[in-house]
Amino acid sequence: MPGRSTRPLDFETRQIHAGAVVDSETRSRVTPIYQTAAYVFDSFDDGEERFAGRSAYRAYSRNENPTNAVAGRRIADLEGGVDGIVVASGQAAIASALSALAANGDHILATRSLYEGTREMFRGVLARQGIEFEYVPDDADDAEWASRIRPNTKAVYTETLPNPLGQVVDIERIGRLAHEAGVPLVVDNTVPTPYLWRPIEDGADIVIHSTSKWLSGHASVIGGAIVDAGRFDWAAQAGRFPQLAAAPRPGVPSFVERYGEGAYLAYVRSVIVLEYGPTVPPTSSFLLLHGIETLSVRMDRHVASAQTVAEWLEARPEVAEVHYPGLPSNPFHARAQRYLPAGAGSIVSIELAGGREAARRFIDALELISPMTHIGDVRTLAIHLGSTIHAKLTPEEQAEAGIGPGLIRLSIGLESVRDILDDLDRGLVAAGGADGA
Ligand SMILES: Cc1ncc(COP(=O)(O)O)c(C=O)c1O
């Protein structure tokens, strides 16, 4: 229509509307909870069409549910991907995304700084399935990266803003190095969310989320998401990815022939999620959608408060080190300014000068801040990592991962900053108490 704007909708608008369709029967404005296991076939032939994936309608909620579909489409839209799917948890998203690429005998190259639960899965269940994981420092030089990628390497895996230390990863460079070797880049973008960083714009091929965190924001659900950028040329790497680029049986088209740019996500949905069944309840997706609607508003406040808190902590004698890339003193600050101009996320980790005993006094003195294992909640959270998430590591392994004896991870919430600082002050006074550190 002449005079009407044709520019794409802004992020703040898409977080509310993308992927939603008004229910045709009821005209419900809010996406309903389709709490159903399965869908009635209109006829014998309709059942056959649905099972063959030739119908617009669904067969079974294990891998296709209308509420879940809206959530998958919305996250894909916000990330700039062609398609997305939501699954039972962030862990399920990682396991499903990688199982679609690698199997027994394959190799995945990962950057060192990753959420410990991910590393646990890599050295645990996925290693037992025969997938070899190798770690490389993300700032290793180009030649070293190239030498580590092998013919059986099926993915390069990283986090944009690693949990818990926030060593901002140069996604553009790692994407280039992966692509030069014919390998896709898989990125966990949980911590910044697509509001602060859209790694597909920097070359990521597959983006993963724990939707339990900031995307939901309310700590009421566990969920995960996989988004496909739709850009990786699977057909050009047919030898590496026959599950996508070769005919599954003679005369049957490959996923690439059938789904084009959506081949990878179609494979995840119709093979991996169908066979493993990491289904997220539609009620969780309903709550997730309500969280996403306010993402930008929450993130602006999360990052503003995190910046204030990090600066305040840096001046405290009880704190030996503050890990927050929004601080000019942080070694990743320049990279944060490049990749995270709207804010460096809301995880602030602190190494207490008094070590483990100071951490015990700090945690036990908190009154407002919740001691718990989670991030991205509206509430401010704190956890001592060495005695919890990283407790299975030896002291040497903890040191290698940058987990000092007094390391506390804070996830800064949306309470008044004054109240957050008052509680942190309470914790730090207690932490410094016994030995004055
Ligand atoms: C960066 C990151 N990725 C993935 C996960 C796993 O997500 P979930 O707890 O939803 O399985 C977490 C959990 O803390 C995380 O921090």
Image: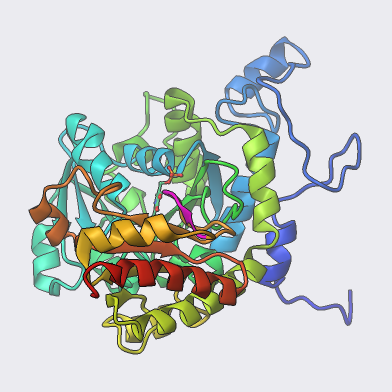
Q: Nearer the viewer, residue 427 or 190?
A: 427
Please name the residue shown 35% across and 89% down the image.
328
Please name the residue shown 50% across and 60% down the image.
369
Residue 298 in the magenta stretch? The answer is: no
Please name the residue shown 73% across and 59% down the image.
16
Q: Is residue 55 left or right of residue 377?
A: right
Image quarter of residue 12: bottom right
Residue 10 image offset from top left, x and y in percent:
69, 73
- Is residue 408 visible in the rendered structure shown here? yes
Q: Nearer the viewer, residue 77 or 118?
A: 118
Name the magenta segment's main secondary structure. loop
Please name the residue shown 59% across and 55% down the image.
217
Residue 84 image offset from top left, x and y in percent:
54, 48
Residue 371 in the magenta stretch? The answer is: yes
- Is residue 403 visible in the rendered structure shown here? no
Highlighted range, magenta: 369-373
5 is higher (above) or lower (below) than 57: below
301 is higher (above) or lower (below) than 288: below
Q: Is residue 352 left or right of residue 8?
A: left
Quadrant housing the N terminus:
bottom right
36 is higher (above) or lower (below) than 306: above
Q: Is residue 230 left or right of residue 219?
A: left
Residue 128 image offset from top left, x and y in percent:
18, 30
Q: Is residue 319 left or right of residue 274?
A: left
Image quarter of residue 413: bottom right
Residue 191 image offset from top left, x and y in percent:
44, 62
Quadrant housing the C terminus:
bottom left
